[in-house]
């Protein structure tokens, strides 16, 4: 007859109730052993990264153990090694690709299909998707940043062509429409430009990011007032000039505002923005308006919510913060 004196003692020491069946007991012991083994592997992987003390080593650890016991230590080590600036550069390079919402969903689905779990295919690239991208990059023996390059995007989209806009000085376009399209303005940027034009006295109507006849007329009027060709379509130089005239610090193409850039990557729809404004108001942070336009009132409300949560009060949301607001306000 087999005895289970040692396993029973181990279970008792762990505060567990001994199972009735021997098979159940073996399963419990096996589970405990597996957990201890994983913890040991996690520890050894971190110690190896610590010994190498390089950006690549710490990133490889985080890619392999995104929820590891030493995740915070590894992230702090990356900051000490200056990886934050590198990540910012990679984020800006990705932003210039102008990845659409449907492409973001397609990338998440492709990563999941290949076994890199993004824990959602909602087009919002939060920590889980960034970790999946980083792990995918590591397995391909490429630089691990968590942000895709143009070549990597093509691979993940299975050959879909994505051409980033060229620099203003080198850009050659055939029409005003093509010139504006090359800017790849986000919905948030379009809303802000509408608000800026209206503030300058050129009425665009509702600032919703949808540039219809009224917005085009406002752009033409602004162009005429500034002695520029009246096309109804903006150029990169005109976007900058409108911003300067309106005295706005809102994000525009090429900005180095990392928080604003990170939020622009989310490409939140007007419906999602209205929902977030309502949820923030419900939580006690008055956005003043619930029109889907993140103006000064909404930015202040976001900053106050961030500060109360012990996070940097940037006034701009990350993917994880969008999800957290939904959870805190009742899902």
Image (cartoon, rainbow, N blue to C red):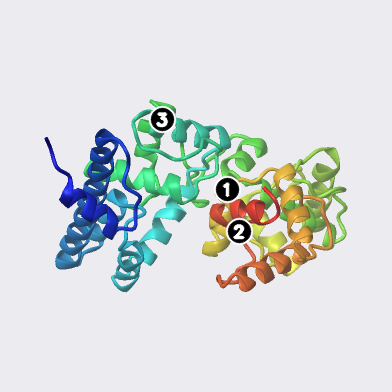
Q: CA distance from mark 2 to mark 3?
A: 26 Å
Q: Residue at x 60, y 58 (%)?
A: 317
Image location (x, y in percent) of residue 184:
58, 43
Task: Name the quadrant containing residue 302.
Answer: bottom right
Q: Residue at x 37, y 44 (%)?
A: 133
Task: State the quadrant of the N terminus.
Answer: top left
Residue 317, disc? 2
Image location (x, y in percent) of residue 37:
20, 50
Q: Indicate the secondary structure of the residue bearing disc 1.
A: loop
Task: Tell me which numbered mark, 1 or 2, is placed earlier along the sequence.
Answer: 1
Exactly how many numbered labels are in the figure?
3
Q: Is residue 243 above or below residue 23?
A: below
Q: Is residue 45 above or below residue 24?
A: below
Residue 110, disc? 3
Image location (x, y in percent) of residue 197:
80, 56
Task: Tell me which numbered mark, 2 or 3, is placed earlier along the sequence.
Answer: 3
Dot 2, how many residues are within 10 Å of its Cα: few (below 14), some (14-19), or many (20+)?
Answer: many
Of the pair 119 and 31, the residue shown nearer to us:
31
Of the pair 285 and 38, the residue shown nearer to us:
38
- Tell me: 286 left or right of 24: right
Dot 1, how many residues are within 10 Å of its Cα: few (below 14), some (14-19), or many (20+)?
Answer: many
Q: Indicate the secondary structure of the residue bearing disc 2.
A: loop
Q: CA distance from mark 1 to mark 2?
A: 9 Å
Task: Name the quadrant containing residue 86.
Answer: bottom left
Residue linked to disc 1:
266
- Tell me: 168 left or right of 242: left
Q: Indicate the secondary structure of the residue bearing disc 3.
A: helix
Task: Tell me which numbered mark, 3 or 1, is placed earlier along the sequence.
Answer: 3
């Amino acid at each position: 007859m087999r005895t289970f004196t040692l396993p029973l003692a181990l279970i008792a020491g762990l505060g567990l109730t001994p199972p009735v069946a021997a098979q159940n007991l073996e399963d419990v012991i096996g589970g405990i052993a597996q957990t201890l083994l994983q913890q040991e592997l996690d520890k050894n992987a971190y110690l190896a990264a610590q010994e190498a003390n390089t950006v690549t080593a710490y990133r490889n650890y985080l890619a392999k153990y995104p929820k590891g016991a030493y995740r915070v230590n590894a992230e702090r080590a990356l900051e000490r090694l200056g990886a934050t600036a590198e990540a910012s550069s990679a984020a800006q390079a990705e932003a210039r690709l102008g990845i659409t919402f449907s492409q973001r969903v397609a990338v998440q689905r492709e990563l999941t299909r290949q076994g890199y779990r993004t824990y959602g295919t909602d087009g919002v690239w939060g920590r889980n998707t960034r970790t999946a991208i980083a792990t995918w990059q590591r397995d391909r023996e490429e630089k691990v940043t968590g942000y895709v390059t143009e070549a990597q995007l093509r691979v993940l989209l299975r050959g879909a062509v994505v051409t980033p806009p060229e620099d203003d000085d080198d850009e050659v376009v055939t029409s005003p429409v093509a010139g504006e399209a090359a800017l790849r303005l986000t919905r948030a940027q379009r809303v802000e430009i509408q608000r800026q034009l209206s503030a300058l006295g050129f009425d665009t109507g509702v600032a919703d990011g949808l540039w219809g006849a009224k917005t085009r007329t406002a752009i033409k009027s602004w162009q005429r007032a500034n002695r520029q060709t009246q096309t109804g379509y903006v150029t990169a130089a005109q976007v900058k000039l409108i911003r300067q005239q309106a005295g706005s610090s809102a994000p525009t193409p090429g900005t180095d505002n990392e928080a604003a850039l990170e939020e622009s990557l989310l490409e939140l729809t007007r419906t999602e923005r209205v929902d977030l404004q309502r949820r923030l108001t419900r939580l006690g942070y008055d956005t003043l308006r619930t029109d889907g336009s993140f103006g000064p009132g909404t930015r202040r409300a976001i900053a106050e919510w961030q500060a109360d949560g012990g996070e940097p009060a940037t006034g701009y949301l990350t993917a994880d913060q969008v999800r957290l607001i939904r959870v805190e306000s009742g899902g």
